[in-house]
């Protein structure tokens, strides 16, 4: 991405997040977080990644569908905020980012594997270099 498209993407990400938090919170009926934005090189289309807080996938999908139906209104509100920044406001396309749910699922699976093996939870790596191979190359050049 060029510097211009990166700046536009960050601006759109920030403004859409602010709009969803302040003006469209009741309409979406759930906590929606904007996790990223990308803009096409011609600045005609903005892809906005969002996460939706919810316990069940059906809840998240329903909230995301409500967000998709609000897209024209969000675009109009965004255009009003950024009217001096663009000649033409990019079209908005929302994508559901389920990375937090995938991460939580992977953590559950790893915990289950550790429990099945009877292992204790893995200690955090402190980067001290005490592990195997930490002394390799310590005597290089001596002799």
Image (cartoon, grey):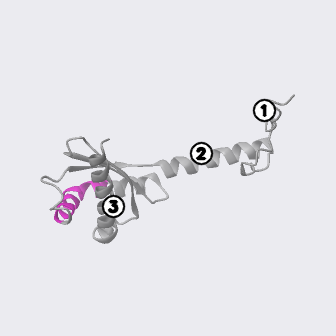
How many C-alpha atoms fall within 10 Å of the one at disc 2: few (<14), some, or many (≥20)? few
Q: Nearer the viewer, mark 3 or mark 2?
A: 3
The quadrant holding residue 80 is: bottom left
Residue ranking furthest to the right: 143
Task: Tell me the residue at 55%/48% (across/down).
Answer: 103
Between disc 1 and disc 3, whose residue precedes? 3
Q: Are marks 3 and 2 in contact (CB under 8 Å)?
A: no
- Does residue 28 appear left or right of residue 87 in this picture? right
Element assignment for label 1: loop
Q: Looking at the picture, tell me which residue is in the foreground, 138 or 95.
A: 138
Return the residue found at the far left: 87
Q: Circle 1 is placed at which residue position?
A: 137
Is residue 71 rendered magenta in the image?
yes
Seen at 80% across and 29% down, the residue is 141
Q: CA distance from mark 1 to mark 2?
A: 36 Å
Q: Position of residue 3 (x, y in %)?
A: 30, 46
Question: Which mark, residue 14?
Answer: 3
Q: Which residues are magenta?
A: 65-80
Q: Position of residue 28 (x, y in %)?
A: 32, 64
Looking at the image, residue 22 sits to the left or right of residue 118; the answer is left
Left or right of 105? Residue 39 is left
What separation in Å lies between label 1 and label 3 (alpha carbons)? 48 Å
Residue 106 is marked as: 2
Relative height, residue 103 to residue 30 (above, below): above
The numbered mark, 3 or 2, whose residue comes first in the sequence reads 3
Q: In what quadrant of the picture does the C terminus appear?
A: top right
């Amino acid at each position: 991405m060029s510097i211009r498209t990166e700046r536009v993407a960050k601006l759109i990400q920030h403004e859409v997040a602010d709009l969803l938090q302040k003006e469209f919170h009741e309409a979406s009926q759930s906590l929606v977080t904007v996790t990223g934005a990308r803009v096409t090189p011609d600045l005609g289309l903005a892809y906005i990644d969002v996460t939706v807080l919810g316990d069940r996938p059906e809840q998240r999908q329903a909230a995301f569908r409500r967000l998709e139906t609000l897209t024209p209104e969000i675009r109009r509100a965004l255009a009003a905020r950024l009217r001096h920044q663009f000649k033409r406001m990019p079209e908005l396309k929302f994508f559901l980012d389920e990375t937090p749910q995938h991460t939580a699922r992977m953590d559950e699976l790893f915990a289950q594997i550790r429990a099945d093996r009877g292992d204790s939870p893995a200690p955090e790596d402190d980067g001290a270099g005490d592990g195997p191979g930490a002394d390799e190359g310590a005597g290089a050049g001596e002799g």
